[in-house]
């Protein structure tokens, strides 16, 4: 059996490598074809040479491939299974295996075990690679690397403060003419403004985790408990502002749906800052999908495998069509659930329901198909 296991595993890994190259390469080719003119503008607007533009293209899609792999990981596994089992069916090898008294469920076991192990690549990609490359993943196609400028309006940090600036330069980690509105929650759960900090510029010190202010002044505000009138005090000079908001985070958090680029630990830290109901729903849905996505990918494989294990090469084409149809249905349902996870239905938001719904629907289907296999 070890020889058969090695043979099946070898075919599956070869198919996995081919499927990975084809699907990710196709996704890169389509995106490059659509946005090629934006990359070409870099040579005209910023005087970049053709070689520099080419290296920028490689750097851009080298980072984007981490996202493409995350999105296609389940489909890649199914295509690899089609490759390996299709080859064995075409060569009538499954008939010989069955004639020797070996169950076809035993034949597909190496594929299932390898799929579980390769799911670790998806987890590593989502939890380690993507968070580290997040600031590069939110770049636009026509952005000049290292020279990106951003506007920043009312971005919150771990202190509950809101940070604003008309210009932030990512390369130097500098905000120009920033305004920081300091606030806290009162006993009723409402935000109370404590004051504001203004400066000519703010530069982040990564080792000390603070923004050093140039000509920075803080104006404190107190509220009279009797009249609810505001009392604005004389500005005092401040040299720095401690915050968890880093130059790496700013481009990421400006991107809509940026929470999908964060690790589970970063999501947990962000949840402690007390975002709004809509953001809380998105945070919780992301945390649930981190658990369900690897399971859904395995379910997609389990749905496809029983159909692909056919003994007649004439039936292989129809088996591939059926397996891809069911797998695509699972993929589409999962994609739709991710879209609806943060939406309100009947005045309620249930991110956990949408995250686990594809498993509830398709796991019984997978068990029924495996149980009904003709082995």
Image (cartoon, helix red, strand yellow):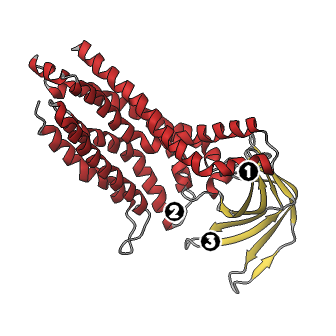
Q: Distance between the residues labelled 2 and 3?
A: 17 Å
Say whether residue 100 is left or right of residue 189.
left
Residue corresponding to mark 3: 191
Q: Residue furthest right?
A: 215
Q: Distance between the residues labelled 1 and 3?
A: 45 Å
Q: Nearer the viewer, residue 186 or 196?
A: 196
Earlier-in-chain disc, 1 versus 2: 1
Residue 260 percent across, percent down from the top left = 51, 51
Q: What element carries label 1?
A: helix
Residue 13 percent across, percent down from the top left = 37, 25
Residue at image x 41%, y 34%? 19
Residue at image x 28%, y 22%? 8
> Which mark's residue is nearer the viewer, 1 or 2?
1
Q: In this view, does 320 lie above or below 192?
A: above
Q: Residues within 10 Å of mark 1 (few under 14, many from 20)?
A: some
The circle drawn on residue 41 is 1
Give the image quarter of residue 367: top left
Q: Is residue 124 above or below residue 343?
A: above
Earlier-in-chain disc, 2 versus 3: 3
Q: Residue furthest front?
A: 314
Earlier-in-chain disc, 1 versus 3: 1
Residue at image x 47%, y 33%? 21
Q: Nearer the viewer, residue 297 or 198?
A: 297
Residue corresponding to mark 2: 279
């Amino acid at each position: 059996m070890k020889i058969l296991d090695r043979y099946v595993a070898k075919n599956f890994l070869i198919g996995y490598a081919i499927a990975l190259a084809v699907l990710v390469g196709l996704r890169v080719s389509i995106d490059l074809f659509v946005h090629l003119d934006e990359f070409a503008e870099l040579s005209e607007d910023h005087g970049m040479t053709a070689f520099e533009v080419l290296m920028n293209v490689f750097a851009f899609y080298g980072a984007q491939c981490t996202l493409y792999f995350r999105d296609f990981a389940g489909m890649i596994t199914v295509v690899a299974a089609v490759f390996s089992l299709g080859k064995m069916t075409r060569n009538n090898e499954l008939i010989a295996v069955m004639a020797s008294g070996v169950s076809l469920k035993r034949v597909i076991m190496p594929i299932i075990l390898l799929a579980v192990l390769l799911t670790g690549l998806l987890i590593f990609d989502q939890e380690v690679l993507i968070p580290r490359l997040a600031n590069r993943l939110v770049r636009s196609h026509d952005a000049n690397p290292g020279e990106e400028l951003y506007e920043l309006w009312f971005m919150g940090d771990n202190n509950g403060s809101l940070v604003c600036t008309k210009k932030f330069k990512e390369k130097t980690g500098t905000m120009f003419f920033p305004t920081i509105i300091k606030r806290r929650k009162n006993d009723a759960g409402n935000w109370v403004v404590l004051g504001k900090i203004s400066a000519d510029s703010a530069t982040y010190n990564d080792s000390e985790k603070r923004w050093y202010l140039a000509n920075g002044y803080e104006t404190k505000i107190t509220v009279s408990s009797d009249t609810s009138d505001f009392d604005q005090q004389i500005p005092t000079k401040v040299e720095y502002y401690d915050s968890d908001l880093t130059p790496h985070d700013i481009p990421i958090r400006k991107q809509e749906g940026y929470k999908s680029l964060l690790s589970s630990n970063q999501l947990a830290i962000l949840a402690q800052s007390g975002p709004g109901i809509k953001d809380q729903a998105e945070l919780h849905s992301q945390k649930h999908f981190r658990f369900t996505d690897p399971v859904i990918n395995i379910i997609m494989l389990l749905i496809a495998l029983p159909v692909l294990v056919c003994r007649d090469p004439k039936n292989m084409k129809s088996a591939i069509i059926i397996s891809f149809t069911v797998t695509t249905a699972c993929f589409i349902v999962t994609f739709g659930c991710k879209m609806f996870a943060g939406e309100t239905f009947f005045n309620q938001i249930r991110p956990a329901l949408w995250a686990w719904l594809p498993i509830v629907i398709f796991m019984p289907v997978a068990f029924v198909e495996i149980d009904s296999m003709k082995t």
